[in-house]
Image (cartoon, rainbow, N blue to C red):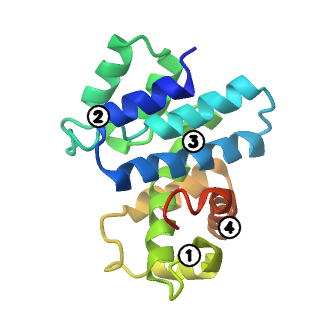
Amino acid sequence: MKTRDEAWALLCEFTQGDALRKHARAVEEAMRAYAKWFGVTDPAEIEKWGIVGLLHDFDYEQNPTEATHLHVGTRVLRERGWPEEIVEAVASHADYMKIPRDTALKKAIYACDELVGFIGAVAKVRPSKRLADTPPESVVKKLKDKAFARSVDRSYVYGGADAIGRPLFDHVNFLIESLKPIAPEIGL
């Protein structure tokens, strides 16, 4: 098994932008929380879930299109000896990769990616610009405003909540709470 330090080094090799690194860190934390929610107790398994979150967009900065994002990333992961379970889970967060979300790990990365980014966007327009002052109601309300954070694909947000079998409000609230301990680190 590869380590979190190796995952961070790979992310930093391919991603220079601070915003995308913070997003990766946020999704890592959300994935760790969801591992526990799904009943994972083995620390190595929880670490694997976190690594999937950390690596899910590692190639995006250099490969920002559907034709390249994840196609390049999965090739790089395989060439560098990452376990196939991690490669598949990373790729499963994008519908266009057509990878069945047949495990809790794959469902969770799909459920966390877009919504974590959206929660961050909502927090940044709050008066305090703090995650701690971002109620889940505000996030759910902003989802209906198609002009707000328009790059966030709402179908992924709603589909992610469905995939893990949680009401959207509960899912949003869970992610907000899971991110609060690292809010200063991720700029929220």
Residue 138 place in picture, x, y as percent: 56, 82
**Left or right: 47, with 114 as reference point:** right
Is the N terminus in the top left, top right, bottom left or bottom right quadrant? Answer: top right
User: Badge 1: few (under 14), some or many (20 or more) residues near its Cα, within 10 Å?
Assistant: some
Q: CA distance from mark 4 to mark 3?
A: 18 Å
Kindly report which numbered mark, 3 or 1, lies closer to the viewer in this rendering. Answer: 1
Residue 174 place in picture, x, y as percent: 69, 61
Amino acid type, mark 3: Lys
Amino acid type, mark 2: Phe
Q: Compare residues 33 and 145 and report the one nearer the observer.
A: 33
Give the residue at the far front of this rendering: 184
Kindly report which numbered mark, 4 or 2, lies closer to the viewer in this rendering. Answer: 2
Residue at image position (36%, 56%) is 19
Residue 112 place in picture, x, y as percent: 54, 51
Q: CA distance from mark 4 to mark 1?
A: 15 Å
Q: Are marks 4 and 3 in contact (CB under 8 Å)?
A: no
